[in-house]
Image: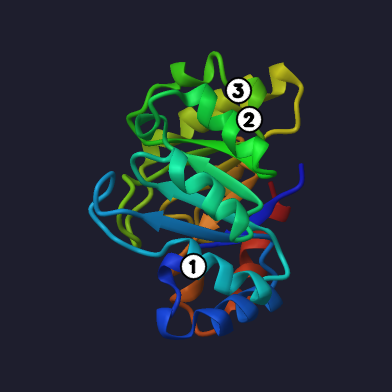
Amino acid sequence: MAFRIAPSILSADFARLGEEVRAVTKAGADLIHFDVMDNHYVPSLTVGPLVCAALRPHAEVPLDVHLMVKPVDRLVSEFARAGASIISFHPEASEHIDRTIALIRENGCKPGLVLNPATPLACLDYTLEKLDLVLLMSVNPGFGGQQFIQSVLPKITEVRRRIDALGRDIWLEVDGGVKADNIASIARAGADTFVAGSAIFGAKDYAAVIREMRARLAMV
């Protein structure tokens, strides 16, 4: 299984985001995770399409846009134009989940569905075959620096079982409290893509942290 590390700019230095994106890409990031919060669906307020467009020239890897906004549909085309490669959203933020998935694909991006720790897996019953990514939150969305919720591990395993049974190349991403000392256990549960914010951007040497994460993953 190929593993991917996606540093989250939520924990980067916002005063020099372009430099941060270049630095973490050079350090070995596979994706740049771009957290969008609206002070409505989640309590915090972060960045929008203009910042995404400004960062696109600085990123040599795909932009993985995670929309924590409600309603979600109007922003899909704006982030697609801003350079997103992947756009994921929460089912609670869409009136018509199937329509939002189709809208993301129509705009030339890969669609992903995001499940909070307490969101049941039933919303995958009629959507999984249409997705390119499932993102499982291992914290409640809205803030960086939270602790990993251990009860999400069996949920990861069940989603991996469903993906394998379907036989499609769907990424299984985990976001929240991911760091070097737990990344292997998350991978063993079935994840292949790992969002890490403070674990990477809170360190002095981004490359050293990413190397350590890959070393732990190599033992899985």
**Residue at image location 53% in from the left, 53% down from the top:** 78
> Is 129 on the left-hand or right-hand side of 176?
right
| Nearer to me, 85 or 205 | 85
What secondary structure is found at the residue carrying circle 1?
helix
- Using the image, determine if residue 23 lies above or below residue 194: below
Residue 185 visible? The answer is: no
Q: Is residue 137 visible?
A: yes
The residue that appears at 63% across and 30% down in the rendered structure is: 131
Amino acid carrying label 3: it is Leu
Q: Which residue is mark 3?
A: 128
Image location of residue 138, percent across then percent down = 41, 43
Which x, y percent locates residue 39? Answer: 25, 54
Residue 43 locus on image (x, y percent): 23, 53
Q: Are marks 1 and 3 in contact (CB under 8 Å)?
A: no
Q: Which residue is mark 2?
A: 131
The answer to which of marks 2 and 1 sits earlier in the sequence is: 1
Mark 2 to mark 1 CA distance (whole Å):
26 Å
Q: Is residue 193 left or right of residue 136?
A: right
| Corner quadrant of residue 53 | bottom right
What amino acid type should be assigned to the residue bearing mark 2? Leu
Q: Position of residue 97 (x, y in %)?
A: 47, 25
Q: Amino acid at mark 1?
A: Leu
Q: Are marks 2 and 3 in contact (CB under 8 Å)?
A: yes
Height in image: 164 above or below 29? above
Q: Is residue 145 above or below residue 104?
A: below
Residue situated in front as seen by the camera: 192 or 67: 67
Crowding near pointer 3: few (<14 within 10 Å), some, many (20+)?
some
Q: Which residue is mark 1?
A: 50
Question: Going 71% across and 23% down the picture, which residue do you hit?
Answer: 164
Callout 2: SS: loop
- Foreground mark, 2 or 1, reads 1
